[in-house]
Amino acid sequence: MARRYSKKASADVAGAMKKRKAGTLKSGRSGRKVKSRKQAIAIGLSEARAKGKKVPKKAKKSAKKSAKKRKTAKKRKAKK
């Protein structure tokens, strides 16, 4: 399977996680301390994106969800 993020991007996320653990990671405008693991990862990825590292912009939609959408669209079309 292909690598999702570059190694350098992973290093940025690891740095953000260390800051969170130390209690020095702060969020956007408010400047509040980050306690959430997920938020720390998001901040790390955001910083990596800003530096121009290989990080996808958005998670891909699951095949299951798109298949469900196609099925409902087909039903609507059949009703008309």
Image (cartoon, rainbow, N blue to C red):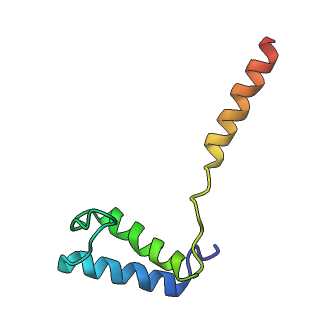
- The number of numbered badges drawn on the structure is 0
Q: Quick one: which residue is furthest to the top in this view? A: 80
Q: Quadrant of the N terminus?
A: bottom right
- Judging depth in this view, the residue of 1 and 39 nearest the camera is 39
Residue at 41 percent of width and 66 percent of height: 42
Residue at 40 percent of width and 78 percent of height: 13
User: Does residue 71 lie above or below 61 as drawn?
Assistant: above
Q: Quadrant of residue 57?
A: bottom right
Q: Quadrant of the C terminus?
A: top right
Q: Quadrant of residue 17?
A: bottom left
- Judging depth in this view, the residue of 46 and 73 nearest the camera is 46
- Judging depth in this view, the residue of 68 and 46 nearest the camera is 46
- Judging depth in this view, the residue of 45 and 71 nearest the camera is 45
The percent coordinates of residue 67 (x first, y second) are 69, 39
Q: Quick one: which residue is furthest to the front in this view? A: 29
For residue 4, side relative to residue 71 (left or right):
left
Q: Quadrant of residue 19?
A: bottom left
User: Does residue 51 lie above or below 33 as drawn?
Assistant: below
For residue 1, side relative to residue 31 (left or right):
right
For residue 16, side relative to residue 10 (left or right):
left
The percent coordinates of residue 21 (x first, y second) are 21, 77
The percent coordinates of residue 36 (x first, y second) are 27, 62
Residue at 74 percent of width and 20 percent of height: 75
